[in-house]
Image: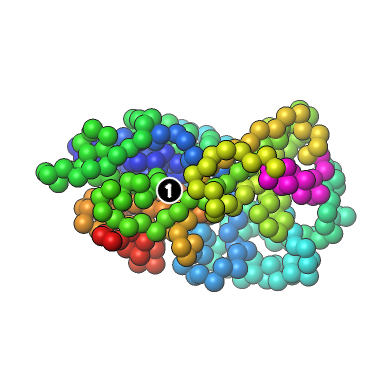
């Protein structure tokens, strides 16, 4: 039986562990030191269809990543696990210049031809909203897309790791190459390694002589908790800028997340910055002030110099695979990328043209 090490237990690592565990000839061990995981700072929105990024490869990845959740949910349910981490609650898209909502509507209609998951698209007036939604403010018009989903990243990764039944080692992993062609990860021997350590990829590969184009981006969110407010029926609210408002079932509303490229691996909470996001969020969601408690989360995303994700086999390290650079689209694209890495490792056909996301452009042997 081949032994596989997965380094990193975030969205990519936990998904990879789950699909690797379905291979009868593989034994899987997951290493994660537990601090700064990007999934902890993920806002939890699956809604890639209205992006204006001109990178067609990125949009293909994000669009198919959104679609892949249907497969992931179905697979977990077939294995007897609940999928309450995923909820297609819809989204309200807002624009300061509300004339641009019409343009977004047409973008959505065009992309609906490729992905029916977008669901119902409708331009609406705030005055037509009823019930609790009538209390939303700060805008006159919106674009509604019913297929957008919210994802509880922490609950998703916990479910995936439980379903994988992989051994989880809570320590910092160190990768070295053995003379027999195998790999040593923190004193254990493995036949193959999957690097899903996000912004920490350089720390794994640089000691082995690689230059890695990956850097850290700090993300912070604030979670609000309500006693009586039924938040499960609220859609995600996406104004312009870095603010998103994500209501979850059970009286929880998250706001965020920040995108801080100059903070390195700092995991401290910047309350002043979160206070600014909270003040802005109250313009749209006035009931935020009625929360009975609040807490903050922080994590470190990974991004590349051109803000493009990548995955593939590491050159000169046979059977070592890596993915990184997902940035704020990690929850959207992460499960699909993990699934592609597992297919690479097991010799199965891919669903994506791997050359469009080539690791060789970002991980280079030697200086």
Residue that numbered label 1 is attached to: 198
Q: Magenta stretch mostly in which secondary structure? A: helix
In which quadrant is the C terminus drawn?
Answer: bottom left
Give me the residue at 60% from left, 43% from top.
220
- Viewer-closest of 165 and 188: 188
Give me the residue at 77% from left, 33% from top.
291
Give me the residue at 49% from left, 44% from top.
265
Quadrant of residue 131 within the rendered picture: top right
Magenta-colored span: 273-287
* Residue 139 in the image, given as x and y percentages of width and height: 82, 57
Quadrant of residue 231 within the rendered picture: top right
Quadrant of residue 292 within the rendered picture: top right
* Residue 179 in the image, given as x and y percentages of width and height: 12, 44
In which quadrant is the N terminus drawn?
Answer: top left
* Residue 264 in the image, given as x and y percentages of width and height: 50, 48
* Residue 18 in the image, given as x and y percentages of width and height: 38, 40
């Amino acid at each position: 039986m081949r032994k596989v090490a997965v380094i990193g237990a975030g969205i990519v690592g936990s998904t990879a562990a789950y699909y690797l565990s379905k291979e009868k000839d593989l034994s899987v061990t997951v290493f994660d030191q537990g601090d700064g995981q990007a999934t902890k700072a993920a806002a939890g929105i699956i809604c890639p269809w209205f992006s204006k990024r001109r990178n067609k490869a990125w949009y293909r990845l994000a669009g198919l990543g959104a679609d892949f959740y249907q497969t992931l949910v179905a697979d977990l349910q077939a294995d007897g696990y609940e999928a309450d981490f995923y909820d297609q609650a819809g989204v309200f898209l807002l624009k300061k210049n509300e004339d641009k909502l019409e343009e977004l509507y047409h973008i959505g209609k065009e992309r609906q031809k490729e992905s029916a998951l977008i669901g119902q698209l409708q331009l609406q007036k705030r005055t037509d909203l009823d019930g609790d939604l009538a209390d939303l403010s700060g805008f006159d018009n919106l674009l509604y897309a019913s297929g957008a989903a919210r994802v509880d990243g922490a609950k998703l990764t916990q479910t995936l790791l439980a379903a994988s039944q992989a051994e989880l080692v809570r320590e910092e992993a160190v990768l070295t190459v053995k003379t027999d062609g195998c790999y040593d990860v923190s004193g254990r021997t493995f036949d193959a390694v999957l690097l899903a350590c996000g912004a920490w990829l350089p720390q794994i590969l640089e000691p082995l002589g690689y230059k890695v184009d990956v850097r850290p981006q700090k993300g912070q969110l604030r979670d609000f908790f309500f006693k009586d407010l039924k938040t499960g029926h609220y859609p995600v609210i996406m104004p312009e800028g870095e603010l998103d408002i994500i209501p979850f079932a059970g009286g929880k509303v998250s706001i965020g997340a920040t995108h801080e490229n100059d903070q390195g691996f700092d995991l401290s909470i910047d309350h002043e910055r979160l206070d600014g996001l909270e003040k802005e969020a109250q313009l749209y969601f006035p009931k935020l002030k009625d929360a009975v408690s609040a807490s903050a989360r922080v994590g470190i995303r990974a991004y590349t110099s051109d803000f493009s994700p990548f995955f593939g086999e590491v050159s000169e390290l046979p059977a070592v695979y890596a993915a990184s650079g997902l940035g704020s689209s990690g929850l959207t694209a992460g499960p699909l990328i993990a699934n592609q890495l597992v297919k690479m490792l097991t010799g199965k056909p891919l669903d994506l043209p791997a050359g469009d996301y080539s690791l060789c452009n970002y991980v280079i042997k030697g200086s």
